[in-house]
Amino acid sequence: MSDQNGRILLSVQNLKKHFPITRGLIIQRQVGTVKAVDGISFDIKEGETLGLVGESGCGKSTTGRTILQLHRPTEGKVFYNDVEISSLPDHDMRMMRRDIQIIFQDPYASLNPRMTVEQIVAEPLEVHGIGNRRERRDRVRDLMDLVGLNPNFINRYPHEFSGGQRQRIGVARALALQPSFIVCDEPISALDVSIQAQVVNLLEDLQKRLGLTYLFIAHDLSMVRHISDRTAVMYLGKIVELADRDELYNNPLHPYTQALLSAVPIPDPPKERDHQRIILEGDVPSPVHPPTGCNFHPRCPVAIDVCSEEDPEWREVAPGHFAACHVI
């Protein structure tokens, strides 16, 4: 658990990422916009893990990639170490990427099958001109050992490893430049359940040893509770609630958070029998045509008239507990 009064390492202010929808083969014209991320704000303190949860397609991964400037934001600002990285030129942003890295979701798609493990893990060092070939090889061996893989396997190819081992290779690549901040973009969702805990335990161990700060993106609420210091809940491009992990799980205020948590099974048969499920009606609206007012109001069991007319204000409901809801 990090020091909750620590220094703010990353600050996201009113971040938006809208993707244009175009038609036409020769002359393309814009016919719509996908509002993948639509005005979110939060801070991450040094040494902290902020969990970001929500249904598939709500904009979690786009948030992570936009923070790293893999997608340039449509609006809003991202500050890292008090530097506004959202307006940095590409060359300066490339230097900044020594300190901010990403672990991708799919270890089968994120590793080049034609490259050996040594080439994959050493690539960031080569791109940034760090060390000679021998020094890079030594660094790769150290990283393999750090993530729990045999350093003698550096000449093997990705297909010779299991899914969990491939994700460890992805972690080693992310650590190659000794970053301080890592976006973990659903790093366990493509893995077997038996392997997920191993990877999460590895990430926790690395955080303690190297002083890392994480944005941990996932849809597994129990795993997020295990690894996070604070948790943010996202719905259709907006963050609807953010609080300390225990506060959020024990006292969820937003109706969407309550519905999400009600779906988590309880490993105690008597309690599970008495557990009240909240079933949401309908499907998630399209981010191309989000509802007026609160995005959640068409599915909300406690919606009132104002919910369909006005976007709720993002406010601090209790110390350190933020939410956006007219009913709270």
Image (tube, rainbow, N blue to C red):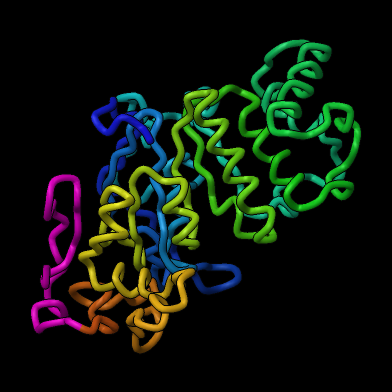
Looking at the image, can residue 254 be seen?
Answer: yes
In the rendered image, the quadrant that contains the N terminus is: top left
The answer to whether residue 52 is left or right of residue 141 is left
Say which quarter of the image contains residue 189: bottom right
Reply above or below: 295 against 46: below
In the rendered image, the quadrant that contains the C terminus is: bottom left
Q: Give the residue displayed 85% in from the left and 39% down from the top.
A: 115
Residue 4 appears at what percent x and percent y? 27, 33
Residue 161 appears at what percent x and percent y? 84, 47
Q: Nearer the viewer, residue 273 or 283?
A: 273
Say which quarter of the image contains residue 45: top left
The answer to whether residue 107 is left or right of residue 160 is left
Residue 319 highlighted magenta (yes or no): yes
Residue 285 appears at what percent x and percent y? 37, 79
Q: Residue furthest left?
A: 306
Residue 95 appears at what percent x and percent y? 52, 22
Q: Which residues are magenta?
A: 302-328
Looking at the image, can residue 29 be seen?
Answer: no
Residue 254 highlighted magenta (yes or no): no
The answer to whether residue 102 is left or right of residue 278 is right
Reply above or below: 213 against 13: above
Q: Give the residue displayed 73% in from the left and 49% down from the top.
A: 164
Q: Give the residue displayed 19% in from the left and 59% down from the top.
A: 323
